[in-house]
Amino acid sequence: MQPVDSHLFLLVGAALFSIGLAVVMLKRHAIVVLMGIELMLNAVNINLVAFSQYDPDRLQGQMLALFVMVVAAAESAVALAIVLRVYRHFRTAQLDELRELND
Amino acid sequence: MVQIAFYAFSALTIIGGLAVLLTRNVLYAAFFLLLTLLGVAGLFVLASADFLAIAQIMIYVGGVLVLVIFGVMLTHRRQLPGEAGSQQANTILSQNRGDSWSWVVALAVAGSLFTALYVLIFRANFTLLANPVGWQNTTGIIGKQLMTEYVVPFEIAGILLLAALVGAAYLASPQSKNAQDAAR
């Protein structure tokens, strides 16, 4: 059972981060933008876990990845509540159609 | 064997991410995000992070993704009452930003970022990555670390989750008429 070369983990993380960045830049639906942010956070977690293999006694990378997951869960809950509120107010969730600050 | 599993999981991850980028249906994007999250959990297992893989499945697939799908359903503009039958498929479309130029700009930025990271990864020559690694069980170590070295971040994470729960419940609750009038 030969472990996998860590460069490949870093490469997958880089690809996933780029895809998430493209999703955030390209999509207009607020929830899809949130999905792009989740993709970027997952890419960061892959990197942290890949480097954490070389620290088997303290596992600092995995601990940080765990806290990243917790913060991502809290972030997505609050963000979806805000999107829901915005949808109720403007009757749309497409970000480019939100042009007014005041009602 | 491990290599084959690694390539399969990374293909699942990348293809799921690309499908989120390419599809226009928001609901399909949510289900492709499921593929990506499961692939990332598999990658965690192959990097000997078994506890994190289970946590990934429970938090992301069980929590965040269900929340996202609820959000998709609740921000769905209702069609005309006559034609929205239960037999029709739900198509909730996400428009792309601007015209075809935005594709060019977004792909240029993301592609150049990926190229830069690729060059960086293979030129950086990390001495750490030459060390041998082994498989190990991480659950016990993570438990000990959470109760000793990381106890303060652990408690802060608990408070953060409580605050996020209260804030999300407050933000998502419908305002009453009186409160709306008072706000104006």
Image (cartoon, helix red, strand yellow):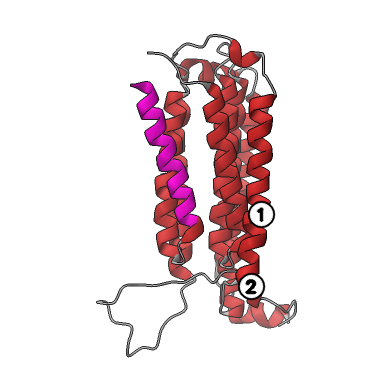
Please identify the quadrant where the N terminus of chain B is shown: top left
Residue A8 magenta-highlighted: no
| Disc 1 packing (10 Å; few <14; some 14–19; many ≥20) | few
On the image, which quarter does residue B3 sit in? top left
Magenta highlight: main SS: helix
Q: Position of residue B23 (x, y in %)?
A: 45, 62
Q: Nearer the viewer, residue B85 or A79?
A: B85
Q: Nearer the viewer, residue B19 or B46?
A: B19
Q: Residue at x 46, y 66 (%)?
A: B24
The reply, left or right, for residue B68 in relation to residue B151 is left
The three-letter amino acid code for the residue at tag 2 is Gly
The three-letter amino acid code for the residue at tag 1 is Ala
Say which mark, if any, is on residue B98: 2
Q: Residue at x 62, y 29 (%)?
A: A64
- The chain containing the residue under callout 2 comes to B
Which residue is labeled 1 in the image? B108
Residue B14 magenta-highlighted: yes
- Please tell me whether residue B43 is drawn above or below residue A54 in the rendered image: below
Q: Position of residue A61 (x, y in %)?
A: 61, 24
- Please tell me whether residue B75 is drawn above or below residue B11 in the rendered image: below
Q: Position of residue B170 (x, y in %)?
A: 60, 62
- Please tell me whether residue A57 is drawn above or below residue A5 in the rendered image: above
On the image, which quarter does residue A49 sit in? top right
Please identify the quadrant where the C terminus of chain B is shown: bottom right
Q: Residue at x 60, y 54 (%)?
A: A22
Say which mark, if any, is on residue A3: none
The reply, left or right, for residue B106 in relation to residue B2 is right
Q: Position of residue B61 (x, y in %)?
A: 42, 45
> Which region is colored magenta?
B1-20
